Image: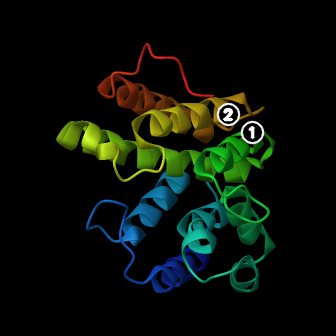
């Protein structure tokens, strides 16, 4: 495994994201990127997939471009990051429309992108569930979709990831963990028996 690539990706992400914090918490965003990359590697990912996991929010949340990533890390890493990004133009500006479009695309994405997306969703879902246990429904105030939309999004993303053909053992294992977190999120939100949003 190319640890130099991972080190370079970590340093790039740390610089690009600067002092950005996690949504709703005084925690540096780099902690999330490290966790997602760690999950990707733990569940069988390559150095390129681990690097893309470290960089997956760069294009959406920093001034870094796909061209920057391509020059620094090569075509494969840049392609994975591009596939993980739901807000590249042309893209519907409305949160629900953007998320629906991204969810429809997930089964067609590369296995590498699906692995990174699953790791990202798992780490985020764990944070949501932890916050629900601490703050109840107030946990959803920081999300565009509020409670119903957020729960819908995680369930829909899970279903879309499960719909993809030929998942790797790592993706299957990540999805097992993600399914448990999403069900707990729904249970805590008292939405287990509620109809899912479109």
Disc 2 target residue: 160
Residue 177 lies, with reference to residue 18, above or below; the image says above
Numbered circles on residues, count: 2
Q: Is residue 113 left or right of residue 126?
A: right
Observer-nearest of 178 and 193: 193
Q: CA distance from mark 2 to mark 1?
A: 7 Å
Q: Is residue 77 left or right of residue 195?
A: right
* Residue drawn at (47%, 65%) of the image: 33
Residue 12 occupies which quadrant of the picture? bottom right
Q: Do the numbered discs 2 and 1 sit on residues whose CB atoms are within 8 Å?
A: yes
Observer-nearest of 82 and 2: 82
Residue 159 occupies which quadrant of the picture? top right
Helix, strand or loop at mark 2 = helix
* Residue drawn at (29%, 45%) of the image: 139
Residue 169 occupies which quadrant of the picture? top right
Observer-nearest of 195 and 58: 195
* Residue drawn at (70%, 85%) of the image: 68
Indicate which disc residue 164 carries: none
Indicate which disc residue 104 carries: 1
Badge 2 local density, few (<14 within 10 Å), some, or many (20+)?
some
* Residue drawn at (51%, 60%) of the image: 37
């Amino acid at each position: 495994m190319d640890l130099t690539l991972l080190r370079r990706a970590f340093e790039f992400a740390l610089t690009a994201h600067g002092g950005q914090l996690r949504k709703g918490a005084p925690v540096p965003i780099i902690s999330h990127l490290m966790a997602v990359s760690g999950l990707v590697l733990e569940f069988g990912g390559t150095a390129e997939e681990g690097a893309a996991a470290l960089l997956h929010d760069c294009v959406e949340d920093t001034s870094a471009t796909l061209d920057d990533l391509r020059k620094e890390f090569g075509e494969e890493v840049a392609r994975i990051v591009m596939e993980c990004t739901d807000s590249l133009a042309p893209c519907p500006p409305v949160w629900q429309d953007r998320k629906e479009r991204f969810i429809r695309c997930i089964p067609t994405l590369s296995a590498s992108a699906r692995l990174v997306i699953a790791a990202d969703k798992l780490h985020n879902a764990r944070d949501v569930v932890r916050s629900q246990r601490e703050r109840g429904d107030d946990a959803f105030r920081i999300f565009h979709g509020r409670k119903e939309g957020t729960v819908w999004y995680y369930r829909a993303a899970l279903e879309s990831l499960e719909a993809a053909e030929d998942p790797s053992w790592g993706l299957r294992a990540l999805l097992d963990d993600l399914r448990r977190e999403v069900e707990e999120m729904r249970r805590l939100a008292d939405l287990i028996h509620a109809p899912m949003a479109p």
